[in-house]
Image (cartoon, rainbow, N blue to C red):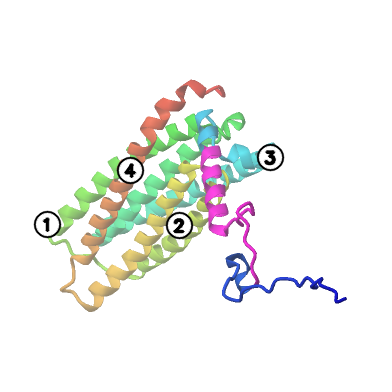
Amino acid sequence: MTDSSVPQTSPVPDPTIVDPTSLNGECESADQPQPKTPSSGATFNMDQSMKIADNVEDRGLLESSMRLKPHEAQSYRKKALWVSWVSIVVTLILAVAAFTVSIMRHSASAFGFAFDATLDVLSSIIVLWRYSNAAAVHSAHREYIACVILGVVFILSAFTILIKAIHDLATKLLPEVDDFLYSVSVVSGVVCIILAVLKFMLGKVLTSRALITDGFNSLVGGVMGFSILISAEVFKHEPKIWYLDGTIGVLIGLIILGYGVKLLIDMVPRVRMTRNYERFE
């Protein structure tokens, strides 16, 4: 008798049927979470930081209140006061020297620098008021009031510089060049740029728009100091380009005017929003 049982064999898979989930050795699962890309994480962190900054500002405080410890904030406040005092003394001396140059040498850019140096003195005085109260180091309301005052001073100074520069262009006033003019321009340019860098650094740490504005004014003063040297050199070799000095004065006046207007547009609404949070006086 023969065994009728046939041994069972395992079915051979059809080579034409391929599991799509096993291509290239990859197994995808619908439930498997997708990895986060660096760009999405960076966007999330940036949005979160912006929300935190807005929430802090809504409570009448600056963003520095979230990042600086109390002793650190007071240390930077004292540094801001020292830089402001140094700026007042130095720029006052430069303003007197530049006014003397502008009168003796009929230089529109020297007059513009002298007025900008005077503006720097006023802006540093405003920064002194801003940080005179130790308890108000993070006060947004006090910060915005200082910026509004700076904006008004900027606009008034810009009109004065523009009027003087346009008058010199209209009357074809020719500048006179000598070693005294060179000395004032070089010293003014170097000192003002150093002050600008210090103010920018402190303003960034304290998130102070007033300090940054003061630094911008010092930077403009430094540029104007070197512009006196440039316009004088050009006039010395090319007397036909006598209008460069007055043109630089007009350009600087327009820059200061634009910055002052923008400052008022940005800060006046914020003063109104944070007036109920001023508790430091």
Instruction: Assess whether residue 50 is covered by the magenta stretch.
Output: yes
- The amino acid beneath tag 4 is Lys
Q: Which residue is mark 2?
A: 192
Q: Which residue is mark 1?
A: 170
Residue at image point 41% right, 59% down: 222
Looking at the image, which residue is at 18% across and 74% down?
Answer: 239
Is residue 44 shown left or right of residue 75? left
Q: Is residue 199 magenta?
A: no
Gap in Å between the C-alphas at discs 4 and 3?
32 Å
Q: Mark 1–mark 2 contact, CB under 8 Å?
A: no
Query: Does residue 10 appear anywhere in the picture?
Result: yes
Helix, strand or loop for disc 4: helix
Tell me the amino acid under the disc marked 1: Ala
178 sits left or right of 65 in the view? left
Location of mark 3 (residue): 69
- Residue 65, position as x, y percentages in the image: 60, 37
Give the Cα distance between marks 3 and 2. Answer: 30 Å
Of label 4 and label 1, which has the lower sequence position?
1
- Spatial distance from mark 1 to mark 3, Cα to Cα? 56 Å
- Residue furthest to the front in view is 1
**Between 45 and 131, the one nearer to me in the picture:** 45
Over which residues does the magenta segment extend? Answer: 25-53
Q: Is residue 44 above or below residue 108?
A: above
* Type of amino acid under label 3: Lys
Query: In whole angstroms, how far apart are the C-alphas of marks 2 and 4?
Result: 23 Å
Task: Check disc 2 and give the amino acid type.
Answer: Cys
Label located before the other in sequence (1 or 2): 1
Residue shown at the point (25%, 67%) measured from the top left? 176
